[in-house]
Image (cartoon, rainbow, N blue to C red):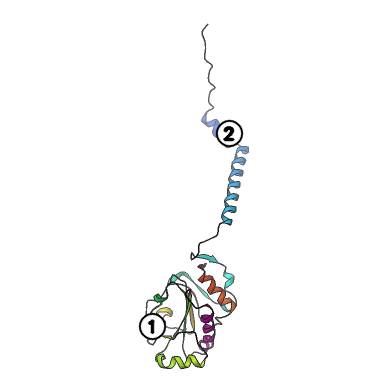
Amino acid sequence: MQNSSPTPPSKPPVSSLIAQLFQPRMMLMIWGGLGALIVLWVGVAAMIPQGKPGQAREIDRDLLVGEMADFELAFPPRGTPLTRFQGPDGETELAAFKGKTVLVNLWATWCPPCVDELPSLDALQESLGGDDFVVVAIAAEPRMDERGPPFLARLGVEYLDLYHDPRLEFVNNALGANPTLPVSILYDARGREVGRLNEGADWNSPEAVALIKAIMGGENIS
């Protein structure tokens, strides 16, 4: 008797497999699986800290309230002006403060709002000034080497170093041809302008301190 081998089952055509794949039940299973993967991914991502120390993260615009309500964000962040100005040890520039969050305040003795906010800037420097933050208050007028120290002393200012821009080169570079004082410009530790306030403020207020601490922490407003 002749042995006969069993006939292998025939494979379904490719068109049949594709048709089965697109059946409603199969589609529901596929989309259900994808949905479960997305939910799992979102859950895992939520448990991972967003950003490393020193790395920019977005912060809430709710920080721009109270004294900081009119703080104007810089988009995109601008670099520091390259022009130089006078400091306690001679000529300097903002690049000398790279690695620190810097609040530049442009003021003048003839500007009442400027004079009014200097004590709050002094208090801010006392409380936050150090390796990570500095207030650089630049007087936009000449002859401040002689006039500046007694003027600040009369205001009770103790913690601000005396900076000034006798030729208004830095002021014009930072503000343009028609500057209006006071102006305070906040730079992050990378030397980028975060934003500015084109009016006087209480810079030792809780709102101002919260904003500055957020930038010191490496956060970025968007």
**Tag 1: residue type?**
Phe
Between discs 1 and 2, the one toward the N terminus: 2
Mark 1: secondary structure: strand
Residue at the spot of label 1: 85
**Tag 2: residue type?**
Gln
Q: Is residue 14 magenta?
A: no
Residue drawn at (38%, 83%) of the image: 85
Q: Give the image location of residue 93, x and y in percent.
A: 39, 78
Q: Is residue 69 visible?
A: no
Q: Give the image location of residue 53, x and y in percent.
A: 50, 64
Label 1 packing within 10 angstroms: few (<14), some (14-19), many (20+): many
Q: Nearer the viewer, residue 17 or 207?
A: 207
Mark 2: secondary structure: helix
Residue at the spot of label 2: 20
Q: Give the image location of residue 204, x and y in percent.
A: 56, 81
Q: CA distance from mark 1 to mark 2?
A: 76 Å
Q: Is residue 86 left or right of residue 30?
A: left
Specify start and end residues of the magenta stretch as a single range.
111-132
Residue drawn at (46%, 70%) of the image: 77
Label 2 packing within 10 angstroms: few (<14), some (14-19), many (20+): few
Q: Nearer the viewer, residue 93 or 88?
A: 88
Callout count:
2
Quarter holding residue 60: bottom right
